């Protein structure tokens, strides 16, 4: 019985409003009523046959911050997502949303297209088209595609080590931040691992974030068997993108009920969580060189929601000379594809304001964060150089490696 | 103060309010007095089932016929008070098909539309039903909002010249040979006393009928039966769910706005004033209803409450041919020689209009006037009000909400206050859905008091009003205090004891 009545049920909400204090969206716009009302509150008014009237549900950014603070364990964001899916199913999704959630397809076009795409994205006429026809805000820089994908690099990179480990790199690393993938592989190899890439598709979080459960499920159904196979061959799985990781570890089982996903979740780890385990068992290669840099670290929402603390910060603090501060701010405001949408750009920017101010106060030379969305947004907000923490760890660990760090 | 009226109606439940409207539409000057607010009796404490008649087809076909006829009329004249959900009569393996087959035949005989659904059909419409069910019979049951119903009746009556005095109870009757000469009544909040003269008096005091008659030295053979109900935090089903077996405890689940109401029990009582829901009743209701909807075992409850129904000895029923067995209409002129007194009691919320019609017909006959009934034709005011859940959800974020759980807007409450005549907090709570949700007013009633204070409408000390409210609230919560409700109450205790220092 307990299983058929999951805790997403609004029955356990005690109306305390604790969640209202943390929601980044309701903090900046009166259009969104906030987690207590949008989630367990509105749930009492939803009837299966009724058309959705909660237009504002589309504004929930899916940051999970409300879930984290709720004293009763209500899965508010999940409730919102389900309502959002229903709303969008009825209202229909713009082509723009399809484009944003299927950007992995561009990646499949291969490196040939990158220069064409990049140039296109810079073009004024294209920008106009992108904004007025597609509804993607022109103030957003569209992510640049790199000339060679991570997979291509990896193919020509002989990996060797005593233990095998599977790497779920995610679309963005493959086509837009190849350097993060390289750094991950290099650090793992420096710790004696042989990295391999199990066959994988987009994790599906962009679709899920847009309430497209079917699209997300399609991806999950491809990934889970392949990841299971890697696990059965005796290796663990690590991810460097906290969003992909959160999707695989939580949503595959909790929301999408993908068979085998619980098993996958058990063996899948955040990259830095994994490194911290190595540290705790005395197996981390920590022969770091001095890195005299002033950096600031931002913990992405999805990382916080994994409930593993801030492993990247713990590891980075081992690097001599590296001055690193934790940025005290709630959410970057990008929310995956949310901040690209014309109608949501202002909200996204307004949410990010706190983060920008917090960064300004710390005056870092670079900012580090585990999520590609956060990196994009922080670059956009501050103009600073923003890297994945693994890139700094790599630099501290390995001398003489090519230094074409990030962008 | 001396008052004079043609007709005096005692009791502001559905029956009394229905009569006031009926007479006012017939142009007969009438005054209603009620010792509390409208709906202080059974009308405000029932199951809210908009009967199709299904529940009575086997045991009392005549009552069933009345129900289905009124069901059809009310759908037309009071659409804003009714949610047309349909109802299922669910057969479980232990019930077997025999009663079901009798039930379907009886529905046919009583003219209650009934459709047999297979297990799979029933489950696809109501996935919360137990998968072990045999079948379900669909009937045109629904949910009725008694507050909306009674208040719309009162409002329309007022438009046609009907008058009422609330919080005014009858204290004694001055008799003169063969009639009631003067009715003495008292404003129970402010102490004002009234001597009321009327040519006819209608006793519509429901379960208090006998107590009232005692004031005239008369009796009616009736017993009192308590029925208890539990309210869940959310709707469990979107149709009324009945058990397909002879009526007994814990066999109905009625959706009502955001919640479901489970009921009911039947316990003999001595007195109509002091009663509460017992732990045994709570366990019994949950045990029985969860056989149909297993999730009830895990569901959160937000309140328990009880109402009292009058029960009649058989000679009382049917001793007048005009009286249906569903309700009791007594002409005390014929029965006891008190020629200006009528008692109307029993029946159902769903048959309130019919009861009012029959009472008014009898009165007209006694008065020798010809004024036909029109309540079956003339719609009640307020049909355009917000009623559906989705309409309410639509308002979220549009303006300041006072009650977060039920999405009652500040404007809505101010509207009610503007209409005036409200004497205490409970009156306001009767007229909105404020405090009827998850936290049971824990977070909104103090906000409401703020508004009352600002507008100078709060009579008396706010702290005392709040204390009174909390005591009432506690009565409803104590019987269901487990699980999330305990957590909620701890929070409330923190707020009221810690922050407000009450
Ligand atoms: C537990 C339960 C469940 C029920 N479920 C349903 C259902 O689902 N569907 C349905 O159709 N019906 C249902 N009923 C029946 C329905 O509630 C009643 O038939 C109906 O409300 C009776 O209305 P009434 O006006 O006759 O009596 P009441 O509503 O009881 O009104 C009598 C009024 O008289 C007032 N009064 C008493 N004495 C005095 C006095 N001396 N001076 C002034 N005023 C006085 C009282 O304060 C009270 O307000 C249920 C009843 C109960 C008890
Ligand atoms: S998931 Fe984030 S944006 Fe959505 S309601 Fe919760 S806190 Fe607000
Ligand atoms: S924090 Fe949890 S319990 Fe409190 S109002 Fe929000 S959802 Fe309800």
Image: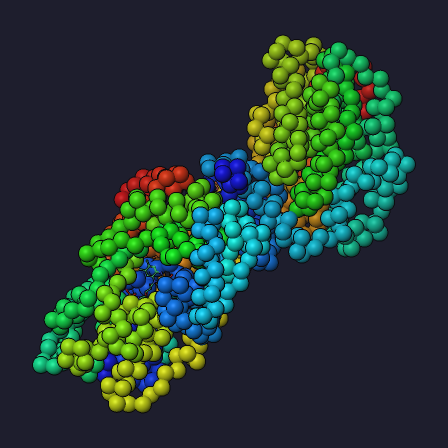
Decide if residue A371 is in sight here.
Answer: no
User: As drawn, is A150 to the left or to the right of B258?
Assistant: right
Q: Could you say which quadrant of the image residue B19 lies in?
A: bottom left
Q: Nearer the viewer, residue B220 or B207?
A: B220
In the rendered image, the vertical position of residue A322 relative to residue A371, given as above or below: above
Q: Going by the picture, which residue comes out furthest to the front?
A: B98
Residue drawn 41% across and 40% down?
A: B484
Residue B478 image position (x, y, % from top left): 31, 44
In the rendered image, the vertical position of residue A21 relative to residue A52, given as above or below: above
Residue drawn 18% across and 77% down?
A: B335
Quadrant of image for the C terminus of chain A: top right
Decide if residue A106 is in sight here.
Answer: yes
User: As drawn, is B289 to the left or to the right of A330?
Assistant: left
Ligand 1 sits in which quadrant?
A: bottom left
Residue B145 image position (x, y, % from top left): 41, 63
Residue drawn 66% across and 25% down?
A: A268
User: As drawn, is B440 to the left or to the right of B219?
Assistant: right
Q: Nearer the viewer, residue B275 or A405?
A: B275
Residue A257 image position (x, y, % from top left): 63, 37
Q: Nearer the viewer, residue A55 or B218?
A: B218
Q: Colour scheme of this structure image?
A: rainbow
Residue B419 image position (x, y, % from top left): 36, 70
Q: Going by the picture, which residue comes out furthest to the left?
A: B177
In the rendered image, the vertical position of residue A167 relative to residue A144, given as above or below: above
């Amino acid at each position: 019985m307990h299983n058929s009545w999951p805790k997403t049920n609004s029955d356990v909400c005690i109306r305390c409003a604790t969640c209202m204090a943390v929601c980044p969206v309701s903090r900046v716009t009166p259009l969104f009523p906030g987690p207590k009302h949008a989630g367990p509150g509105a749930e009492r008014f939803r009837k299966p046959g009724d058309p959705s009237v909660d237009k504002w549900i589309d504004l929930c950014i899916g940051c999970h911050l409300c879930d984290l603070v709720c004293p009763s364990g209500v899965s508010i964001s999940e409730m919102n997502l389900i309502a959002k899916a229903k709303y969008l199913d009825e209202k229909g999704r713009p082509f723009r949303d399809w484009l944003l959630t299927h950007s992995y397809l561009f990646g499949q076009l291969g490196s040939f297209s990158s220069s064409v795409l990049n140039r296109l994205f810079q073009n004024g006429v294209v920008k106009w088209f992108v904004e007025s026809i597609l509804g993607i805000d022109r103030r957003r820089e569209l992510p640049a595609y790199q000339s060679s994908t991570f997979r291509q690099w990896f193919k020509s990179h002989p990996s060797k080590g005593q233990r095998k480990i599977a790497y779920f790199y995610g679309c963005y690393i493959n086509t837009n931040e190849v350097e993060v993938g390289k750094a991950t592989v290099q650090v793992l190899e420096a710790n004696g691992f042989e990295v391999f890439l199990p066959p994988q598709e987009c994790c599906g979080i962009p679709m899920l974030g847009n309430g497209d459960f079917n699209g997300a499920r399609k991806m999950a159904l491809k990934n889970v068997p392949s990841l299971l196979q890697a696990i059965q061959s005796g290796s663990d799985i690590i991810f460097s993108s906290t969003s992909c990781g959160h999707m695989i570890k939580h949503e595959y089982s909790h929301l999408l009920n993908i068979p085998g996903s619980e098993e996958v979740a058990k063996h899948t780890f955040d990259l830095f969580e994994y490194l911290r385990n190595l540290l705790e068992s005395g197996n981390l290669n920590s022969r770091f060189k001095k890195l005299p840099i002033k950096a600031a670290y931002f913990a992405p929402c999805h990382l916080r929601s994994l409930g593993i603390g801030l492993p990247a910060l713990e590891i980075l603090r081992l690097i001599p000379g590296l001055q690193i501060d934790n940025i005290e701010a709630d959410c970057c405001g990008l929310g995956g594809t949310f901040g690209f949408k014309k109608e949501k750009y202002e909200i996204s920017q307004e949410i990010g304001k706190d983060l920008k101010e917090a960064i300004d106060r710390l005056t870092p030379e670079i900012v580090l964060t585990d999520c590609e969305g956060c990196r994009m947004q922080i670059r956009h907000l501050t103009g600073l150089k923003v890297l994945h923490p693994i890139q700094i760890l790599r630099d501290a660990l390995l001398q003489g490696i090519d230094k074409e760090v990030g962008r | 103060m001396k008052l004079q009226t043609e007709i005096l109606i005692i009791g502001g439940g559905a029956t009394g309010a229905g009569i006031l409207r009926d007479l006012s539409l017939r142009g007969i000057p009438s005054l209603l007095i009620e010792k509390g607010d409208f709906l202080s009796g059974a009308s405000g404490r029932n199951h809210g089932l908009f009967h199709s008649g299904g529940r009575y087809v086997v045991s009392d076909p005549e009552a069933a016929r009345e129900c289905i006829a009124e069901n059809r009329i009310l759908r037309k004249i009071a659409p804003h008070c009714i949610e047309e959900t349909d109802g299922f009569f669910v057969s479980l393996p232990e019930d077997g098909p025999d009663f079901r087959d009798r039930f379907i035949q009886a529905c046919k005989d009583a003219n209650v539309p009934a459709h047999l659904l297979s297990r799979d059909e029933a489950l696809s419409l109501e996935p919360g039903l137990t998968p072990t069910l045999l079948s379900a019979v669909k009937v045109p049951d629904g949910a009725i909002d008694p507050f909306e119903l009674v208040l719309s009746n009162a409002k329309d009556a007022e438009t046609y010249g009907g008058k009422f005095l609330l919080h005014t109870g009858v204290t004694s009757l001055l008799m003169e040979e063969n009639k009631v000469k003067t009715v003495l009544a008292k404003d129970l909040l402010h102490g004002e006393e009234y001597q009321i003269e009327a040519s006819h008096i209608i006793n519509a005091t429901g379960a208090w009928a006998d107590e009232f008659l005692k004031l005239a030295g008369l009796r009616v053979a009736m017993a009192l039966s308590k029925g208890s109900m539990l309210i869940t935090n959310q709707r469990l089903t979107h149709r009324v769910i009945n058990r397909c077996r002879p009526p007994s405890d814990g066999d109905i689940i009625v959706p009502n706005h955001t919640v479901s109401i489970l009921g009911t029990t039947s316990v003999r009582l001595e007195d109509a004033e002091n009663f509460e829901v017992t732990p045994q009743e709570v366990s019994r209701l949950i045990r029985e209803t969860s056989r149909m909807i297993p999730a009830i075992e895990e569901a959160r409850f937000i309140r328990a409450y009880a109402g009292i129904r009058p029960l009649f000895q058989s000679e009382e029923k049917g001793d007048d041919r005009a009286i249906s067995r569903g309700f009791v209409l007594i002409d005390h002129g014929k029965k006891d020689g008190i020629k200006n007194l009528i008692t109307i009691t029993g029946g159902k919320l769903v048959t309130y209009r019919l009861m009012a019609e029959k009472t008014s017909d009898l009165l007209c006959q006694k008065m020798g006037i010809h004024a036909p009934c029109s309540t079956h034709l003339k719609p009640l005011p307020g049909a355009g009000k917000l009623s559906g859940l989705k309409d309410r959800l639509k308002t979220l974020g549009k303006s300041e909400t006072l009650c977060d759980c039920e999405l009652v807007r500040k404007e809505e409450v101010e509207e009610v206050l503007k209409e005036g005549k409200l004497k205490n907090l409970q009156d306001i709570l009767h007229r909105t859905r404020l405090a009827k949700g998850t936290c049971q007013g824990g977070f909104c009633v103090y906000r409401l008091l703020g508004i009352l204070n600002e507008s100078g409408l709060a009579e008396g000390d706010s702290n005392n009003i709040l204390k009174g409210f909390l005591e009432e609230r506690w009565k409803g919560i104590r019987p269901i205090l487990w699980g999330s409700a305990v957590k909620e109450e701890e929070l409330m205790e923190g707020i009221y004891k810690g922050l407000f220092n009450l």
